[in-house]
Image (cartoon, rainbow, N blue to C red):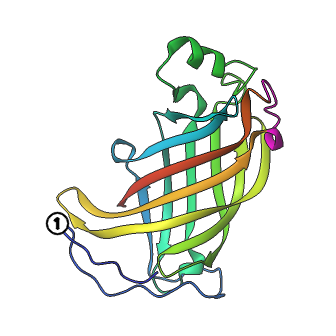
Amino acid sequence: LAGRPVTGVLSARPAAPAVTPASPIASAQATVFQVDAVHSAVVFRVGHLGVANFWGRFNSISGSFTYDEANPAASMFDITVPTESVDTGNAARDRHLKTPDFFNAREFPNITFKSTGIEAATSEKWNVTGDLSLHGVTKPVTATIEWIGEGQTSQGHKRGFEATFIIKRSDFGMTNMMGPVGDEVTLMISFEGTKK
């Protein structure tokens, strides 16, 4: 990742190296960050009736990530999103989404993503492969993860990323109301971590 100019309370730092096909073994410089749920967000977009996109969100997120400045290919992401926290601004619809018709939140309480590999896309974006678990199904997916910034702040040493996943819900056994509700879903996660 090339260094992005840092402003505000963040302190400037040297540019980070780009991801190369290096060893996946972390170096001694690897830094672990705990996801700050208060300053992170999860939203999703899906087609409705073929005429518009419908948006929703999840109100909870947890996890951690490791950034290895000496060997970025060894960086790792581990994110958990509780399905019970789904929020579309309509209580009746939210209750329906938590049933077995969709997320089945009681049986499958979490959506998780655990990275398995990283490749550079641009100087500030990575293509991150990993295992996405949703609705009791685990499949390999590739997300685009963009580095937003890093620095020492009044709330500790912080680093932030934004991730975009494009999946088909049918691949995860979520086939109810196919047609009125689109199959392709875009899931976007903005997560800020605090250095442990």
31 relative to 126 in the view: left or right: left
Element at badge 1?
A: loop
Q: Quadrant of residue 108?
A: top right
9 relative to 117 in the view: left or right: left
Q: Residue furthest top?
A: 92
Q: Position of residue 18 (x, y in %)?
A: 51, 86
Tag 1: residue type? Answer: Gly
Q: Quadrant of residue 59?
A: top left
Q: Quadrant of residue 131?
A: bottom right
Q: Residue at x 57, y 26 (%)?
A: 84
Query: Is residue 165 depicted above or below 105 in this figure?
Result: below
Q: Residue at x 46, y 22 (%)?
A: 89
Query: Is residue 148 depicted above or below 52 in this figure?
Result: below
Inspect the magenta stretch and tell me whether residue 171 lies in it.
yes
**Numbered range of the magenta stretch:** 170-178
163 relative to 23 in the view: left or right: left
Q: Main secondary structure of the magenta part?
A: loop
What residue is shown with label 1? 8
Between residue 51 and residue 128, name the one nearer to us: 51
Between residue 94 and residue 49, name the one nearer to us: 49
Q: Residue at x 56, y 61 (%)?
A: 77
Q: Residues within 10 Å of mark 1 (few under 14, many from 20)?
A: few
Query: Is residue 175 depicted above or below 10 in this figure?
Result: above
